Amino acid sequence: MQKSESTPIYRKLLDDLKKQIDEGEFKKGEMLPSENDLCKSYHTTRPTVRQALSELTNMGYIVRQQGKGSIVAEPRRGLGILSVSGVTAGVGDQNLKTVIVEKPVKQEWPAELLHQLSFEEKEAGCIYFTRLRYINNIPILYEETFLSDTNLPRFTSRSLENRSFLKVLYEHYQVEVVGGEQKIWAIAADKNKSKLLKLKLNSPLAHMKRKLRTNVKDLNIYSWLYCNTENYYLDDYF
Amino acid sequence: MQKSESTPIYRKLLDDLKKQIDEGEFKKGEMLPSENDLCKSYHTTRPTVRQALSELTNMGYIVRQQGKGSIVAEPRRGLGILSVSGVTAGVGDQNLKTVIVEKPVKQEWPAELLHQLSFEEKEAGCIYFTRLRYINNIPILYEETFLSDTNLPRFTSRSLENRSFLKVLYEHYQVEVVGGEQKIWAIAADKNKSKLLKLKLNSPLAHMKRKLRTNVKDLNIYSWLYCNTENYYLDDYF
DNA sequence: TAAATATACATGTATATACAACTTAATTTT
DNA sequence: AAAATTAAGTTGTATATACATGTATATTTA
């Protein structure tokens, strides 16, 4: 994966530092190089460096202390995406089944993505599909996925069934997820979701809106997740 | 530059805009004055104005669109509790109020911590207290906290009211959170929680069980969180 | 009239610089 | 030896400026 020359300096610095923290090169409690040192390394000036550090702070990767420096806050395992785990044991591949509910179609971008779309994303239009994930043959997770119709990916339904969607993206198109964010709510199941997940109306559901950034410019994956947490939970390590 | 006031210019601008949005002076979907206009109003320059707008963006108050302007966003804001830094990291201190519901008392460890306690933790016993956190005077988060009665911390109720609990631990006892894990469910509010959070019975709640590991051996902080996500959400970056 | 072009204005990125405020460690004074 | 001071280094705040890039509208052109 290579960064185009149009990638802003602060973005490169941000991604570099983030990667180094993720991979444990900078460990929790350690200090990052000072702003002035980073200026020298990246041949830039403090405001630019500070923009990167400021975003790292917002993401919770570092804590900055006046007079002292930038302290690494919390190493994250892997991508840090909330995963679904069982109460008893981990969920192996065997017990996991993924079924397409709605095949990929081109449609309008939804209004409530919570993220501003770039021009290219809007231009390209939106591919939309939905899937239902079963654990031990019980529907646990309903997932609506939106991504821009840029360039490459032409999905067959089959390619989304049993393998991870992200795995397909990586193996076929060298698309990698480099970061993202998610927002989480508890909501009451509406008619549609309760039917899909075989739950009573108004059952509590964990709802997530995710944006996954990739190494391809203007290719972000947006998904809305609805998870039955009666017997499973979402977990996270930090 | 003269400092007749001690509060930074960007802070004032930030607070002013935030207040105007909170109070509905700027409504959802409307445009804020342009950066240059704000420069003139506040007799300052773009970088300073942009610092304020940037923080407003992080707080979810506005969305900025290149070429267009700053648009007032949905008044939903992230709590940031998925990171170790605690609730105060996500929402400004100003509108956050913490109230002790049950003062710290020594009691038995609960059975459903989901984590195995060490011998020393069991030996030391458990300090328990509960708090209710308000944002803009609305109860949003109910928190039950358990920690072992090891060594140091003797909390007064007051020390837990307005400042972050973790901050107190750090400043008074040099206790730092070095990692942890959390599990998340969506649950229906029972009688107790619905009363505390002023919700209808069975309203969906985000429920988390967290274990925070510290730099002190056998001092872990366990907490059970119950969060009303009607108007706020939990968020996470990776 | 419809399409292409120019324009004004918005935010995005970046450089260069200055001083304030805080932290830490070394130095000086008591 | 202990306390106070100094100095060096760090982040925080701010000014001033320049150009790039995206949006919307007015203008020109076909």
Image: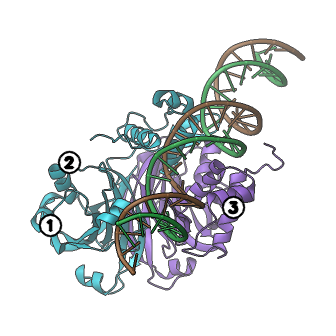
Chain colours: A cyan, B purple, C brown, D green
Q: Is residue A164 left or right of residue B93?
A: left
Asked whether the residues under marks 2 and 1 belong to the same chain, the reply is yes
Q: Position of residue B63 (x, y in %)?
A: 51, 64
Q: Nearer the viewer, residue A119 or B85?
A: A119
Q: Residue at x 44, y 46 (%)?
A: B179
Res A63 → quadrant = top right
Res B134 → quadrant = bottom right
Q: Position of residue C13 (x, y in %)?
A: 49, 45
Q: Residue at x 59, y 67 (%)?
A: B133
Q: What is the residue that sits farthest to the left in this orientation?
A: A158
Which amino acid lies under the numbered mark 2 shown in the image of this protein?
Gln
Q: Is residue A111 left or right of residue A108?
A: right
Q: Position of residue B198 (x, y in %)?
A: 56, 81
Q: Nearer the viewer, residue B14 or B227?
A: B14
How crowded pointer 3 is (Cα within 10 Å; few <14, some 14-19, many 20+) is rated as some
- Chain containing mark 1: A
Q: Is residue B111 visible?
A: no
Judged by depth in the image, the label closer to the viewer, 3 or 1, is: 3
Q: On screen, B204 above or below B80? A: below
Q: CA distance from mark 2 to mark 3?
A: 45 Å
Q: Is residue B117 visible?
A: yes
Secondary structure under the numbered disc 1 in the rendered image: strand
Secondary structure under the numbered disc 3 in the rendered image: helix
Look at mark 3 in the image and give the residue it sits on: B15
Q: CA distance from mark 3 to mark 1?
A: 50 Å
Looking at the rendered image, the quarter that the N terminus of chain A falls into is top left
- Chain containing mark 2: A
Look at mark 1 in the image and give the residue it sits on: A97
Look at mark 2 in the image and give the residue it sits on: A174
